[in-house]
Amino acid sequence: MASAPEIVGDEVTAGASSAARCIELRLLGNTFHPVYTHQLFENETIRGYIPPSNEEAIRNENDEDTALRELKVRIDLSPSCELCRVSLETKCPKKRRLLRSCVTQRYAKRSNAVPSAENVDDSNEEKNDDSDGDESSETVTSEKSASEGSGTSVYVDEDVEEAVNNTKEEGNTRHRRMPLSEVESCLSRALPTIASKAESDIEQKYLTATPGTYLEEYERRGDRFRLTLANGSDAVTYHNEVQRMARFFIETADDVDVADQSVGGTWNILYLFQIHGEKQYSFAGYFTLYHFNSPFRKPTPGTVVRICQALILPPYQRSGHGFTMMNAAYKWAFDGYSKQLKGADAGIAKSIVEINVEDPAPAFVALRNRVDYHRFLEAKAKNENWFGSSADSFQHPDISWPDFFAPLKDSILNEASATAKITSKQVQVVYELLRLHQLQTYSNTAGASNTEALEKRYRLLVKKRLQREYKEDLGACNSKEEMKSLLKELYEQTRRQYEDITRSQSLSTRFLCLG
């Protein structure tokens, strides 16, 4: 079942969960938090710990209020992202230690019980902690056994009344804090190889050569970047290290065997690297490209390329790298790298008939729409129209023409899809973006009051596609009113995304004209 499209502003924020706020990643002087931790920690909470006290985001009500220790996880990534160093620091603030002591003493008093050995240890710890100042701390790095001082850690509820009342319940009401060794083990699923003690200079571990075939280099904000295209079988060792980080930033990420050819398709990886000097490169991102033969595709059979994973690390986001990489994938599909590619990779490019995306996240939907619309406008400026013989009716100049906002016919969709090497749905999206831009231009001169009827016709155009695309979601509604409400919400989200694209495209065009 498809999920509703969302604008970029509705994305999950990095460091929003309890576990994510405990984790700090560092790369080349940049510090950032994960976006997702649900594949590593249940309920995105590290059991028995809270984020450092300088984190001011909302705390998780289910677990954090009963935790007694703060946890800070620092992960230093090597520039190549083949290695990392993990350091775990725990602290017990004085106010929490005093409250824990209060709970222990009141529990003993009301139950007429002698404190357990664990509680006696806790009390001794608190006395020792008080003599050291406001808080006690322990730091464990990946070189030290993370089980030291943590394997028997426990914590109790800070709510005194709940703690006392629970003593009469059958069973153990105390929760076991996750040992630090287990924390590191969970983290390892989203990290490259954790460095040994001997690897003390991972900050200097750059790549001396980039995997794959060189495609092009470009400059962005004063830094140089390189794009390469690697065959999955050749890059499997390197990719197995860097792809694990996707679990921090892609909700449905999993490990892909890019060397696997058992199901008939093959893999390529489009890599992005920052250039720091001669034979000195750092990892910035990748697209995984799965290509397979589609003999029954209409109107043209051939090779279909599917973008399965797209990762750009946070320090490089919102700098246009995704836009550049998406365009590079299309350039490859149109044999634009024929001079660079040899052998099988060159042969694949000549047979590509379509590029699509597997289960795109909301931000990638917006990126893809932006790129496809930009490509259409570029082709139009060069008189390379995607719509061939249908171009005249498609570009009718009179917005009051009865069929100006009519959906595209299947024959036009198929023709444009084959020309642009995109899906027919993306052709319809480009068409809707163009019509919105034309409607906005007309409204700026005629006034909003004179475009109400045209706005309605445009709204119906988009809603017809949304009805087809989200047929199952709409069919699951309990009433017509609920269905109308969902369809309205889908339209408004799509409209906001479209307006953002047309606005940025207009600004880009204006900037180029001024230049």
Image (cartoon, grey):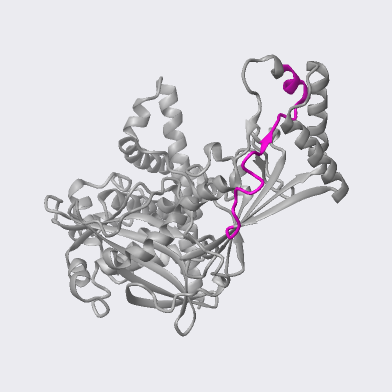
**Magenta segment boundaries in residue numbering:** 142-165
Relative placement, left or right, of 272 versus 269 is right
Residue that lies at the very extreme toward the bottom in this rendered image: 278
- Does residue 215 belong to the magenta stretch? no
Residue drawn at x 42%, y 53% is 364
Q: Residue at x 60, y 38 (%)?
A: 47
Position of 67 compared to 237: left or right? right
Query: Nearest the camera: 148 or 377?
Result: 148
- Image quadrant containing the N terminus: top left
Could you say where residue 314 lies in the image, as x and y percent from the top left? 53, 60
Q: Main secondary structure of the magenta part?
A: loop
The reply to whether residue 290 is in sight is yes
79 vs 122, nearest the viewer:
122
Name the spot of residue 393 as percent of width and height, x first.
24, 54
Q: Residue at 41% across / 75% down in the picture?
A: 226
Residue 478 sits above or below residue 27 on the image: above
Q: Is residue 256 above or below residue 175?
A: below
Query: Which is more toward the observer, 323 or 201?
Result: 201
Q: In the rendered view, tell whether residue 229 sits above or below residue 105.
A: below
Expressed as whole percent of the image width and height from the top left, the position of residue 268 reads 29, 63
130 to the left or right of 380: right
Which percent across, then down, holds residue 159?
75, 26
Whether residue 374 can be seen here? no
- Total numbered labels placed on residues in the image: 0
